[in-house]
Image: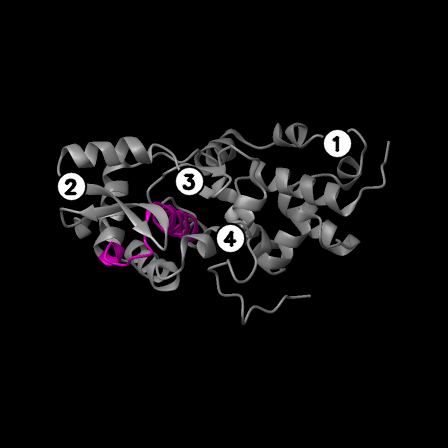
Amino acid sequence: MKAKLSQKQIGQRITELRKLKGLSQEDLAKRVKISRPSLAQIELGNRSVDILELQKFSEVLEFSLDDFVSKDFSAADQGEEISEAKSVQVETRMSVPTLSINKFRNVLLYILERCAGKPNVGETVLYKLLYFADFNYYELYEEHLTGAKYRKLPYGPVPQKLDTIVAQMMEKNQVQRIKTDFHGYPQTRYIPLEKPDLTLLKASEKEIIDKVIEQYSDWSASAISAYSHKDMPWLASKEGEEIDYELAFYREAPFSVRNYGNEIEEQ
């Protein structure tokens, strides 16, 4: 039985089918000849889809229009028709981030080397610099930088296992933790005692980290926390739960690090 679908339902079904096919938003947008921001808006349910566009989606994602508008539509049923090779591709793309402890330590040491002398860079600002470095890199390259997982907490995204990693680094005399007072408020700061091994960072990784430092390292803890609360990955996540890196693809200005200034949607 056919159902009248809302924009949100259409967006959800396209998202599910895209992920089953192992396609990024960039891949799908190019194939259906629309811009990636337009596709992001469709998937969020903020933009309508006309019948010609839906026909293009059906050709690329290999679904039946009759099935798509059916009340009993299931993306999983459509996925059964995808070959085993494509299923492997999906599993690879949708894999959960895996923390590279050595990479994380060196990213942390690099940020501290650049920023530890700034009086505003306490624990709160440091958390946000790590978050924006990780999520900006993933949005731009669709690869994980450190593979750290972040949880949505009241003061913003917080990297998991950071306390354990820092404790290990303190034992090895790689960092020092100090308690200070900043503008009348208690502040936890970290001082690097060892230089980062920059051979572990690709040029693209260092470039993203440098841009994050340049953009945010002079912000106050309250300002950068408030800003992070407006970022789509944080907004779309539930309190206390892990933040999905895939949500970085739904960012809009000023958070998105992709340049769509010259992108023209093909009709």
Which numbered disc covers residue 73? 1
Please name the colour scheme applied to the rendered image. one colour
Secondary element at tag 2: loop
Q: Magenta residues?
A: 114-137
Q: CA distance from mark 2 to mark 3?
A: 21 Å
Q: Amino acid at mark 4?
A: Ala
Quarter placement of the C terminus: bottom right
Reading the image, the residue beneath label 4 is 226
Quarter placement of the N terminus: top right
Say which label, 3 or 4, has the lower sequence index: 3
Q: Main secondary structure of the magenta part?
A: helix
Residue 121 painted magenta? yes
Of badges 4 and 1, the one in the foreground is 4
- Local crowd at mark 1 within 10 Å, few (<14), some, or many (≥20)? some
Camera-nearest residue between 26 and 79? 26
Secondary element at tag 1: loop
- Local crowd at mark 3 within 10 Å, few (<14), some, or many (≥20)? many
Left-right relation of 98 to 189: right
Which numbered disc covers residue 158? 3
Reading the image, the residue beneath label 2 is 174
Q: CA distance from mark 4 to mark 1?
A: 40 Å
Q: CA distance from mark 2 to mark 4?
A: 31 Å
The percent position of residue 43, horizontal first and vertical second, equals: 65, 47
